[in-house]
Image (cartoon, rainbow, N blue to C red):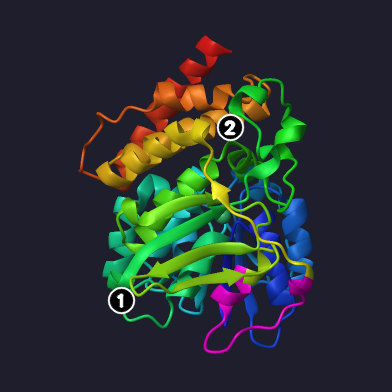
């Protein structure tokens, strides 16, 4: 199976490469796409010999040295051609943030199987991407761990009409059991220090604020085509139960694994039979699983996510852009941790209800929202 990995040099990209490495007889890295980390991509080329390497950043592309048997690409039309290349079987969308929308949008019209890790592209552009994918018969398989768990819990079922409730679990992040008012002085290092998962900086901060779970609620609403009222967010500190589906007959089905992104990736990359990987087994004899309610003082942010689910339009674009600016500003140490929420609250405007969604309108609303959010950052920094 020929894989095109978009976002090869990021955290998810590394996990995908590890699964491919362990299944070389059935999986082939056909091509990769990256922004500009050519130091890392040259290592990948050395180990996996992909036929095509797309480099988004023009400077990095121009500085790239020639390598035998590898074709280097740059520019939107070459990205489009690579995504639609007849030898590509599976496209992995592993770019972090809104930056991944362009590639996910192109992949949606390819008619190929898409393994989706880029939740921001669905939050920002769900009303655009999902219909395009459906029309072009591009199958989307989630590799966000919670969504992959839901996907596995639903497989074999005839219809989601039998679903009573879906519980999306949250680890609680590095500030589990801390009140928002206790988080005034936390540093960037504290916030990046996730107890269970090793991830990129954007999702680590989202996990610390719990905004990640709100983005995942919106992502789930689109991917499983169910109203937000079916989804409940629950804190599960051990990150072993990755989500739970409860059916109308009282059965609940969940998916368990140690926290390791290669598990959902291996599932999504499998065809009829599962792919073997080396993994840490759960020690069931000493296992203790606990669950607790989503923190009350973070309800307001969950409420915004539910408004986005119900109203759609460009509200997801606004929510996502406000959060991305807030997280970037926190990582640059321009604002304190708790002000991430303030930037989102002051930027989010649920009066924007245009239903006329296009890639152009999403890009425009995203740019406008970023400008607005940056002004908010300046005013409260
Ligand atoms: Mg997740």
Of marks 1 and 2, the one in the foreground:
1
Tell me which corner region of the image, top left, top right, bottom left or bottom right, holds residue 192: top right
The percent position of residue 112, horizontal first and vertical second, equals 42, 74
Q: Quadrant of the C terminus?
A: top right
Secondary-structure class at tag 1: loop
Q: Which residues are magenta?
A: 264-285
The percent position of residue 139, horizontal first and vertical second, equals 40, 72
Which residue is under mark 1? 159
Give me the residue at 65% from left, 57% from top. Answer: 239
The numbered dot on residue 327 is 2
Secondary-structure class at tag 2: helix
The answer to whether 281 is drawn above or below residue 8 in the figure is below
The answer to whether 123 is drawn above or below residue 41 in the figure is above
Give me the residue at 66% from left, 33% from top. Answer: 178
Give me the residue at 47% from left, 17% from top. Answer: 376
State yes or no: residue 222 in magenta: no
Q: Is residue 141 visible?
A: yes
Give me the residue at 49% from left, 73% from top. Answer: 253
Q: Is residue 115 visible?
A: no
């Amino acid at each position: 199976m020929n894989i095109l990995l978009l976002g090869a040099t990021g955290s998810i990209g590394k996990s995908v490469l590890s699964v491919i490495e362990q299944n070389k007889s059935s999986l082939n890295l056909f091509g990769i796409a990256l922004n500009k980390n050519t130091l890392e991509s040259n290592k990948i080329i050395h180990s996996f010999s992909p036929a095509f390497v797309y480099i988004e950043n023009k400077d990095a592309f121009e500085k790239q040295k020639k390598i035998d048997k590898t074709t280097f690409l740059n520019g939107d039309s070459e990205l489009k051609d690579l995504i639609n290349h007849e030898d590509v079987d599976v496209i992995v969308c592993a770019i972090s943030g809104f930056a991944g929308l362009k590639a996910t949008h192109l992949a949606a019209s390819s008619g190929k199987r898409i393994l989706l890790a880029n939740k921001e592209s669905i939050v920002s552009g769900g009303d655009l991407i999902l219909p395009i994918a459906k029309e072009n018969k591009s199958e989307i398989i989630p590799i966000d761990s919670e969504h992959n768990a839901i996907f596995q819990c639903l497989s074999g079922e005839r219809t989601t009409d039998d679903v009573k409730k879906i519980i999306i679990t949250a680890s609680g992040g590095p500030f589990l059991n801390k009140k928002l008012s206790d988080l005034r002085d936390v540093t960037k290092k504290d916030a990046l220090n996730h107890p269970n998962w090793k991830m990129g900086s954007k999702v680590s901060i989202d996990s610390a604020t719990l905004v990640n779970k709100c983005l995942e609620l919106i992502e789930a609403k689109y991917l499983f085509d169910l109203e937000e009222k079916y989804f409940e967010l629950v804190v599960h500190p051990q990150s072993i139960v990755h989500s739970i589906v409860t059916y109308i007959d009282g059965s609940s089905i969940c998916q368990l694994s140690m926290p390791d992104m290669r598990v959902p990736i291996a599932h999504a990359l499998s065809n009829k039979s599962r792919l073997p990987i080396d993994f840490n087994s759960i020690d069931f004899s000493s296992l203790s699983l606990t669950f607790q309610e989503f923190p009350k003082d973070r309800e307001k942010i969950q409420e915004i996510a539910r408004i986005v689910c119900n109203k759609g339009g460009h509200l997801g674009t606004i929510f996502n852009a406000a959060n991305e600016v807030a997280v970037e500003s926190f990582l640059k140490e321009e604002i304190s941790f708790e002000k991430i929420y303030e930037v989102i609250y002051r930027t989010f405007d649920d009066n924007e209800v245009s239903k006329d969604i296009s890639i152009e309108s999403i890009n425009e609303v995203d740019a406008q929202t970023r400008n607005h959010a940056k002004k908010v950052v300046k005013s409260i920094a």
